[in-house]
Amino acid sequence: MESSTELALRIAGRAAERAGAAVTYVTGPDLILPMYDINDPDRQPVVKDFIESVRQADGLILASPGYHGGMSGLFKNAMDYLEDLREDERPYLHNRAVGCISTAYGWQAAVATLQQLRQITHALRGWPTPMGGAINSLNSKFDTDGECSDESTTASLEMIGLQVVDFAHKHR
């Protein structure tokens, strides 16, 4: 069963695809990476694949569940690996649009996690899209087809996907 975070990400991703983007999803199981260690330059193939997918992206949509008031550990560990992009021609997330989505069972963790995603994006030199998504999964339910019960949540998620594509086209 897909998580509400992944289902929300896929709504934004489908909107980006409809706008012409080629979308690659890196979700929960793909984020099970060894703990990041800056002193260990040897990267496993799964880590190299993750880093390369970010390196090639003109825009990203970051999505994390809010656990205990913050982003998931798997997600944060994956973000730490972006340090490997520091010497690239486009270091980190330089000049890339980044949509940010958080889901949590309550507003406090959803909003706190969204803010953390936006702060990480800034720290990595990316441009958070104006629209961000803090989703309270107590109120917005996702069905087995990946549709959201709340139309305004769906519209916000689609706007995030569209803003990422729009910015990527303008700054390519």
Image: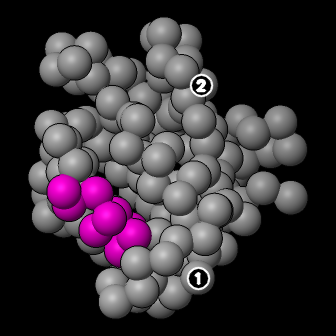
Return the residue found at the far front.
42
**Eyeballing the image, is 101 above or below 159?**
below
Q: Quadrant of the N terminus?
A: bottom right
Q: Position of residue 156 (x, y in %)?
A: 41, 35
**In the image, what residue occupies the spot 56% across and 44% down?**
9
Residue mark closest to the camera, 1 vs 2: 1
Find residue 123 and report its image quarter.
bottom left
Instruction: Assess whether residue 100 is covered by the magenta stretch.
Output: no
Q: Position of residue 164 (x, y in %)?
A: 33, 29
**Eyeballing the image, is 78 above or below 121?**
below
**In the image, what residue occupies the spot 28% across and 57% down?**
85
Instruction: Assess whether residue 81 is covered by the magenta stretch.
Output: yes
Residues 21 and 152: in front is 21
In the picture, the disc for residue 34 is: 1
**In the image, what residue occupies the spot 39% across and 35% down?**
57
Q: Earlier in the sequence, mark 1 or mark 2?
A: 2
In the picture, the disc for residue 97 is: none
Amino acid type, residue under disc 2 in the picture: Arg
Q: CA distance from mark 1 to mark 2?
A: 30 Å
Residues 159 and 43: in front is 43
**Eyeballing the image, is 159 above or below 51?**
above
Residue 30 appears in view:
yes
Find residue 163 and report its image quarter.
top left
Amino acid type, residue under disc 1 in the picture: Pro
Q: Residues within 10 Å of mark 1 (few under 14, many from 20)?
A: some
Read off the magenta span: 79-87
Secondary structure at numbered mark 2? helix
For label 2, the residue is 14
